[in-house]
Image (cartoon, rainbow, N blue to C red):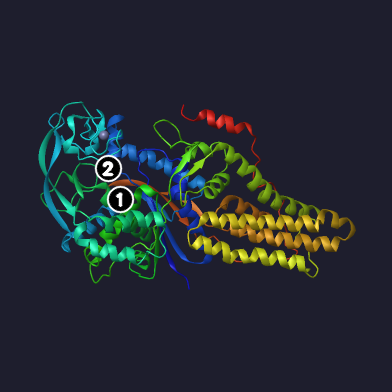
Amino acid sequence: MNENILVAVAWPYANSLIHVGNITGSYLPADIFARYQRLVGNRVIMVSGSDSHGTPVTVRADAEETTPLKIYQHFHAGFLELFQKLGLTYDLFTSTHTENHFKVSQSIFLALQQNGFLYTERQQQWYSPTQRRFLPDRYVEGNCYLCGYPNARGDQCDNCGNLLDATLLQNPRSKIDGEAPELLETEHFYLDLGKLQPEIVEFLRQRESYWRSNVLRQSLGQILATELHGRAITRDLDWGIPVPVDGWSGKCLYVWFEAVIGYLSAAIEWSQVVGQPQAWHDWWYNPQARSYYFIGKDNIPFHAVIWPAQLIGAGKAFGEIFEGGDAVALVAPYDVPANEFMNLEGQKISGSRNWAVWGLDFLSRYDPDPLRYYLTVNMPENRDTDWDWGDFLSRNNNELVATWGNLANRVLSFAYKQWDGFVPVPGELRPADQEILTAVEAGFQVVGEHLNAVHLRAAITEAVRLASEVNKYLDQAAPWFEIKSDKAAAATTIYTALRAIDSLKILLSPFLPFTSQRLHTYFGYQEPLFGEQRVETHSDQLGEHTVLRYDPQKGRGQWKPSQLPAGQALKQPAPLFKKLDESIVEEERARLGT
Ligand SMILES: [Zn+2]
């Protein structure tokens, strides 16, 4: 019955901070989903890491006159801090700059080559005579050959928005020293996507019935409309993974090609870290295992088309090359529940204009669960959404505090005070008591189905609706008055409400893990709902690298209705959430864009 679930999460580029749009786009939905699957009893590994190679990192290093390694390490450390504070339970969050990832990526490359899915081609590329190196497309600026805009980047024009062929730029100049580059011939490896097209179409057809429409549109829809072309997978760059072929020194695997391989390499590294080096086979060689890729919509083609192509193309040859012996084919993605974008106060989030709510900055002023709550009810699952500070305030005060937090706090406080710190012993349950418990317990099925289908907004909406039902039940039964005339009847009401809240705590725990755990201790339970997160430092031939790890061992939470024992000793409760003052709306808006 226990299933193997791989939760594969987008790899943040180690060249900028993480904002709320990134969090709601991929990291948070992945964590909610992983926590739920663990509560159900499935075997989950949630993996990701910092994307440490590629031009964005080298551009930033050049701009700051430092090394790409230092840039990657700086941002990576910030990611680990944020993810811990936000409670993102990565079984392993590592980076692409590890010996293991190099070896796995090179093995995928060699497997594709062995199976005939790579070819080489000579092309023209801008070369800087002053720097004596080839320039990545992003390093060259010039006049757009489509609209004439004078500051177009080699890869894209910010004025007309078109993707450009860098070699066609007019009046080209190097971003590094402003000098004019010249076109020289260079040779690169290409992934033969055209040859893999029938297999990719077949792969997508098998998933057509349950994938999100935005993902299908950008994968199957586009492939059926146009033929796939080969895509360069190497480039002239010295920061990255060397091409594992003699005579190709000075060239690296293109970052888009190797970063997605991180989902596989991180699972392999996780296996080594937990001391079961073959454990990753249970997810990657097991056709019954389900793999979910949590990404933003800008990454759909890479995860729904190109990564499956790499996996299908590498096939069994990967295992033979990587670890020898008989191997089986790697498991292709089961689902790619990509999210749309979140805007901020009606405008696109922009890091360079500081039009953003940054994760760590937010958490310096607010608690993590209100952020997780707002980013879930407002998650861009089917269309773009908007972060609005006024909406954040009212959702926090009217839903999180008023509907859920106050319910838990007033019932627990009343029980703690009136029954001397113990769960009251109920009499026989009356129809209204049975009814509310039945309604809440049905939530395990309904909310669970939404979670399993990655419909997280629907899931949290249903859980909060059930909390409202418990509020209505209490308004009717009014135990605060009932106790004056009939303490036994009030005991039955409060026991019923406590048990409903104890169940709601589990239903809400994937979304609100910190406050659910606190509530769990107020109920007097000793063993925690969830496991533990920690940062570790590992070393290999490339040096030391830090990772975030989640150890699920101590977590005892289960996705099933409360069996709250009457007479259990409670702990002194305290409010779960803070009511926020209206003044924060103007204060926070004033921070934007400055
Ligand atoms: Zn243009």
- Secondary structure under tag 1 reads helix
The three-letter code of the residue at mark 1 reads Ala
Which one is nearer the viewer's eye here, 348 or 7? 348
Indicate left or right for 586 with 173 as reference: right
Q: Is residue 571 above or below residue 44?
A: above
Residue 192, numbered label: none
For the residue carrying disc 2, how many other residues have a C-alpha within 10 Å: few (<14), some (14-19), or many (20+)?
many
| Residue under numbered circle 1 | 259
Q: Residue at x 22, y 66 (%)?
A: 317
Residue 408: x and y, percent? 69, 53
Q: Is residue 105 above or below residue 155?
A: below
Residue 83: x and y, percent? 47, 46
Residue located farthest toward the bottom when viewing the structure as drawn: 1
Residue 54, numbered label: 2
Tell me the distance, in whole angstroms, between the alpha carbons under discs 2 and 1.
Answer: 9 Å
Residue 151: x and y, percent? 26, 29
Q: Quadrant of ligand 1?
A: top left
Which one is nearer the viewer's eye here, 274 or 186? 186
